[in-house]
Image (spheres, rainbow, N blue to C red):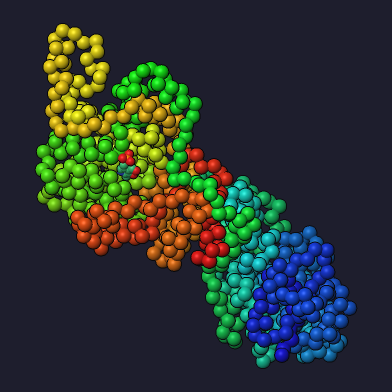
Amino acid sequence: MKKALITGVTGQDGSYLAELLIKKGYEVHGLVRRSSTFNRHNIDHIFTTDAGRLEHLHYGDMADMNSLMSILKKVRPDEIYNLAAQSHVKISFDVPSYTAHTDALGVLSLLEAVRLLGLKSKIYQASTSELYSGDKEDAPQNEQTPFKPKSPYGVAKLYAFNIARVYRESYGMFVVNGILFNHESPRRGTNFVSRKIARGVAEICAGTRDHIELGNLDAVRDWGYAPEYMEAAWAMLQQETPEDFVIATGETHTVREFTEAAFARIGVTLRFEGTGADEVGIDAASGKTRVTIDPQYFRPNEVKYLQGDSGKAFALFGWKPKTTFAELVEIMMDSELAKVHYIKPKAEKTDARIGVGCLEITDTEKRYVNEVLESGRLSQGPFIKRFEREFAAAHDARFAVMVNSGTSALEMAVACLKEVHGWQDNDEILCPAVTFVASSNVILANNLKPVFVDVDPQTYNIDPAKIEEKITPRTRAIMAVHLFGQPAAMDKIQDIARRHALRIIEDSCETMFAKYQGTSVGVMSDIACFSTYAAHILVTGVGGLAVTNDPKYAEILRSLANHGRDNIYISIDDDKNTKGEELKEIISRRFNFVRRGYSYRVTEMEGALGCAQLERHAATIAKRKENGAYFNLHLAQFGGHLQLPMAAPGAEHVFMMYPIVIKKSSPVKKADLVQYLEEHGIETRDMLPLINQGFYTDLYGDLEAHYPVAKWINNNGFYIASHQMLTSHEREHIVSVFKEFFYTAGSS
Ligand SMILES: Cc1ncc(COP(=O)(O)O)c(C=O)c1O
């Protein structure tokens, strides 16, 4: 069995090399420095038993020749990998003598010890790209490129390089220098820029840190993945003759690019502003500063441009990099993200529920409802009138009619348009294949036929590109549903409607106070309907509103809600303060029913609740949007599995809910994830199954076969809460349960 001694075994490279050599059947020994605190997390999994540790880990120090002699005498290694060094370039300016002692003279001690003991050990000396000047003219650097180090570290390593060469040439020893360019991994020390960025970004993602401070963003480096570099180190010692080799990817990236890629992993796009020490990296979505420059990280003498040419290693032993820069950043980020999760307390299974909806009752609601109770007026009073007026105004609309549900409002809207435009039974209304069942039920309730249109796979709203193929001579209208808080693509829908002389109804039950290309929902159609049922944006218990700008529609809607009454007497106040001819007219028509109507009225208490909530709707919407952005940021790390909500260009998403669809490429099963969330107190709902429901398949057969996007959503979509009463603790809990599912429940 071959024996190897690794100095610097606790570091990134040492730990990967130990793993590699053990896999290759070596007996691996390590030299560890005595320090007051153990720093062996990188190798704890390798030297797992106390006995193994005692047998294979030896106290020593590169600055202590005696210790090197005694370890070498005891182990008598076939191969020695000298990785021990003070390897931080910036710190070498702070501790130049120490750096020279360990990184330069330490190597001399090791070579001299091997020579004096008469060992035949092959020696790998960890050299570095910091030997080069880093001037762009020199790039790409290879074994022939002249050395001109710019730091105490580089100078010490240059001595080591040369003394190794001198021992090779003078004493015939098998000594090689591996000139390794930057090679990173999750085991990098946290004060190295790659790891520092990865960790910092993960902490930002976890909400425990606000921003990261960096030095020179424009330093160009050639970054590879550390374990692959240790394969090269081993291969160098297996060659016939000892030679020096450059190991690098040949690809260059700036620190800025590394930073951008790390942020991209958590769904954040950075925008850089300013120059020099005043430059900042801003989260383009939230406007928050995430990167600042701290000149203390500038090196006194910067190596600007490193790009290695490892053609010789490829020619002699076929080494080439396998992991791309993007993959390296991903590996490092995912490791840090897992750790952020790891240090968080475990999410407990809980009976406390984070419901998809909330009920926010303040003193205003209580006061207004009490006013109703004390007024002796439960129906058709001032609160309903005020709510209708203010709700319409908040949507830039002229009229609103409050009824007892969103469904009632929709049913009336269809009935109104049917009456005005003379639609016949079985005429067709286009309706998205994913929506709450009420959107199409109201079409059936009016003896019309819903014709489904598949939805957009990103927004989940009706796909305008698929509307026209469903239009027939009997098509009369488009039911444009604004799902989960995001308006549908109304510009395209309006254009199609105009060209085909179709009416539009907005089913805006899930979306209030949102704009599409600057226009409010509610006024982009003939009639728009809203719901104030539980879990909606405003909650009045039961309730809904039909909104329109057309006075004729408004009159008919009001009549429909009141049994189809003649509009002369809709409200019980309509005969108040009238006399003479006017009163006579009202009396004669008070019980005139001019159409088949409904009894869809609400009480003043719903009106009162609506008024109270409307007063603070701006804050409600702001909080919901903030929650949406929070989940988008913190769940982005699962972007490989989950499709998170995104707003279409020009669409304002007000997050009535937070919809998630499991990607087709993910092995995760919706049932498993949903069960896990529910068991950890997070309520979910299916993402609006409609065309797969028995009632509809009985009517129309296997619709899913014709609606692939709807089918995917039906099987993989669900939503969780994003309401305004979510506490920061609840939001964190939700994210940590997702993390736990993906990192520890073994699903990723
Ligand atoms: C898209 C959509 N349409 C219609 C409705 C019906 O509203 P309501 O429950 O008030 O009848 C809802 C309710 O959740 C809905 O989400």
Relative to 563, is 307 above or below?
A: below
Relative to 289, is 575 above or below?
A: above
Q: Nearer the viewer, residue 672 or 514?
A: 672
The residue sitting at 78% across, 90% down in the picture is 120
Q: Which of 701 and 167 is in front in this view?
A: 701
Give the residue furthest to the right. Answer: 66
The residue sitting at 81% across, 80% down in the picture is 110
Q: In this view, does 609 lie to the left or right of 732?
A: left
Q: Can residue 335 be seen in this view?
A: yes
State the image coordinates of residue 661 (x, y, percent, origin top left).
Answer: 40, 57
Give the residue furthest to the top. Answer: 580
State the image coordinates of residue 236 (x, y, percent, origin top left).
Answer: 66, 84
Give the residue furthest to the bottom. Answer: 240
The residue sitting at 69% across, 75% down in the picture is 46
Q: Can residue 265 be seen in this view?
A: no
State the image coordinates of residue 576 (x, y, percent, origin top left).
Answer: 24, 13
Indicate the quadrant containing the N terminus: top left, top right, bottom left or bottom right: bottom right
State the image coordinates of residue 97 (x, y, percent, origin top left).
Answer: 83, 65
Q: Nearer the viewer, residue 336 or 606?
A: 606
Q: In which quarter of the image is residue 69?
A: bottom right
Split into quadrants, the picture shows ligand 1 in the one at top left
